[in-house]
Amino acid sequence: MLSALDIIYKYYPADDALRRLLILHSRQVADMALEVAHRHPELHLDEAFIERAAMLHDLGIFQTNAPGIHCHGDAPYLLHGRLGAEIMRTEGDEAVARVCERHTGTGLTAEAIRRQNLPLPPGDYTPQTMEEKVICYADKFFSKSHPEQRRDVEQTLKSLSKFGPEGLEIFKAWHQIFG
């Protein structure tokens, strides 16, 4: 099995702004998720998996159209998780594929996808395992648009508020466990 960085280099062969941003953001998320794991040994989290999955959770961004973060693909940015999951399935790593497709917001339910008419195949894309939840939680503290800063809890809640109250409640519950 290829290492996380080897997979990133495979799909991001140029040492350009996008690859550097992806690695920086992924490292930030991985480090915070590992901080959570170290603070909470009672959760018995798989730290090796957390590091690998956190490094690869945004792998699909290069296929999306988000020029503000150097992405010049064709797909809507919302699909980056699903696209990353497809890549990880071709790499033979179903567990990381599930992290990729379940980390958007605090997860996307089948009902939310239907109600908002989101461009995703029907399904439930919410984090299920504790490792998936920790990575999703840590990801909410970092923006690829402002990679120089780590959001605090209030800034994170404000960022999530535009997606509705369900995500806020999920994040607050995670913060009670992981914070």
Image (tube, rainbow, N blue to C red):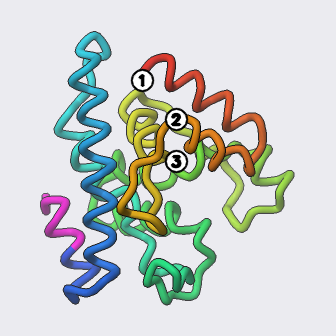
Crowding at mark 2 (Cα within 10 Å: few <14, some 14-19, many 20+):
some
**Residue contact at pointers 1 and 2, CB within 8 angstroms:** yes
- Identify residue type, mark 2: Val
The residues tagged by marks 2 and 3 sit, at their Cα atoms, a distance apart of 21 Å
Q: In the rendered image, which quarter is residue 155 located in?
A: top right
Q: Secondary structure at mark 2?
A: helix
Could you tell me the amino acid type at mark 3? Arg
Seen at 86% across and 51% down, the residue is 115
Which of the labelled discs sits on residue 179, or is there none? Answer: 1
Q: Is residue 133 magenta?
A: no
Disc nearer the start of the sequence (2/3): 3
Q: Image height check: is 112 above or below 14?
A: above
Left or right: residue 27 versus residue 136 is: left
2 magenta-colored: yes
Q: Position of residue 172 (x, y in %)?
A: 59, 26
Residue placed most toward the observer, 63 or 94: 63
Q: Residues within 10 Å of mark 1 (few under 14, many from 20)?
A: some
The CA distance from mark 1 to mark 2 is 9 Å
The image's mark for residue 102 is 3
- Mark nearest the camera among 3 and 1 is 1
Query: Which range of residues does the magenta coloring cover?
Result: 1-8
The residue nearer to you, when weighing 105 against 92, is 105
Q: What residue appears at the point 25 percent right and 18 percent down from the top-left corner?
A: 44
- The residue where tag 2 is placed is 153
